[in-house]
Amino acid sequence: MTFTIRTIFLALVLNYISLGQALSQKQWSYPTKGYVYQFPKDHGSHPNYKIEWWYITGHVKGDDNDYLGFESTFFRIGQKEGSDIHLAHMAITDIKRQNFYHEERLNKEGWNAYSKTGDLDLKNGNWTLKRSKDNQFLLNFSIKSDFLINLKLTPQKPLVIFGEDGISKKGPSKTAASHYITFSRLGVSGTILSDKKELKVKGNAWMDHEISSSQLDENQVGWDWVSVQLNDNREVMAYILRNKDGSISDFSKLVWISEDGELTHQNPDEFQWIQNGNYKSRETGAVYPISPSFSTKDPKSGTIRKFTVIPLMEEQEIPGKIGGVPYWEGACEVANEKGQVIGTAYLELSGYSGNLKKRLN
């Protein structure tokens, strides 16, 4: 979500406005340089900020060559005290059978939907995400009557904080920023129940937590974002912010994460992103470049590397039936210059069904 104000948040705003309910005029906090992070407190909710989300994607394998991708996103949008709105979205990509399952929920804050302060404790119906005392993340969700998922996620590397001096800038405005906390590699174990069959699974996941009150720049119409987990125990996070005139925003970014969690930031003049692999949605008609490639200098070897993102199935679009803003987010593999698969990824593509800013006007 990794970069993300995420299309799901925009769907929530659109849905809420469509109900004719005005957003609260509460004065919100904004990310500032020099913010001192405190954990586990900062894993929890930050009600003084208007926008917050917790995002997990992963790849897991089980018996009988079952291979699944999963996505879990919890959102909080601030209103007046005690009346926040909570949106959540879950998805499963069944790679072996080439099936995609997803579900969205929208609820007002209460006993059945909340994000607690002090530590990570989220709920939206029977969907929950909590941090245990031994620093494991417990994720439980269902997707309609198709799946029941219970996963334990264990950090394999220290958390990282993207950006500079505690904030991740997304535009020239002082408010266009977030506090961006990431676990770039978590070990996953647990069970997935489907068709009365319980599958024991293991794999890896990526987890983002972003805290903000405003991110979108007036000139931006969408973004392409990817998280990559390489087989050599390094990761890459990259995104391009697309401007109205077709150019790439100067606030686009690529970040390498070393084996021990050291970050190497690269600006858009230091990497190249090429859009490829157009897929036209049968449901919305949007056309998504679902197989991009990007070239970047490897901080370990000093050489220019080229990576190609390969979707594990084409049809991984979220049609946005709650808020009316479609986007594509899917499980992928990553290949090197020789075509060899050297890692896994999740790719997010937004703004391809129309200008997101116009939808909010």
Image (cartoon, grey):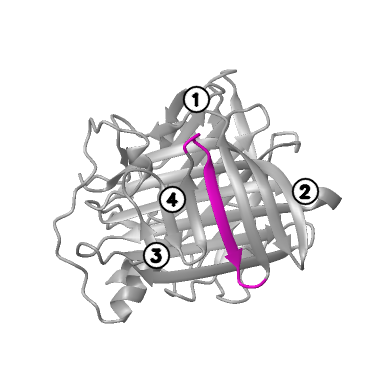
Instruction: Give the alpha-carbon distance from disc 1 to disc 3, as whole Å.
Output: 34 Å
Q: Left of 307 or right of it: where is 110?
A: left
Instruction: Give the alpha-carbon distance from disc 4 to disc 2, as whole Å.
Output: 26 Å
> Residue 54's mark?
4
Which residue shows up at 37% across the image and 64% down it? Answer: 86
Among numbered discs 2 and 3, the one appearing first in the sequence: 2
Q: Where is residue 356 in the image (x, y as percent from the top left)?
A: 37, 65
The stretch in magenta equals 133-145
Please state which of the two labelled residues, at mark 1 or mark 3, is closer to the viewer: 3
Please state which of the two labelled residues, at mark 1 or mark 4, is closer to the viewer: 4
Which residue shows up at 24% across the image and 44% down it? Answer: 172
- In the rendered image, residue 144 lying in the magenta stretch gets the answer yes
Q: Where is residue 80 in the image (x, y as percent from the top left)?
A: 19, 64
Residue type indicated by callout 4: Trp
Residue on which the image places disc 3? 113
In this rendering, is residue 19 above or below 89? below
For the residues bearing labels 1 and 4, Cβ distance under 8 angstroms: no
Q: Where is residue 63 in the image (x, y as percent from the top left)?
A: 82, 49
Residue on which the image places disc 1? 261
Q: Left of 136 or right of it: where is 211?
A: left
Instruction: Give the alpha-carbon distance from disc 2 to disc 1, as whole Å.
Output: 28 Å
Tell me if mark 4 has few (under 14), some (14-19) or many (20+) residues whose alpha carbon lies within 10 angstroms of its own: many
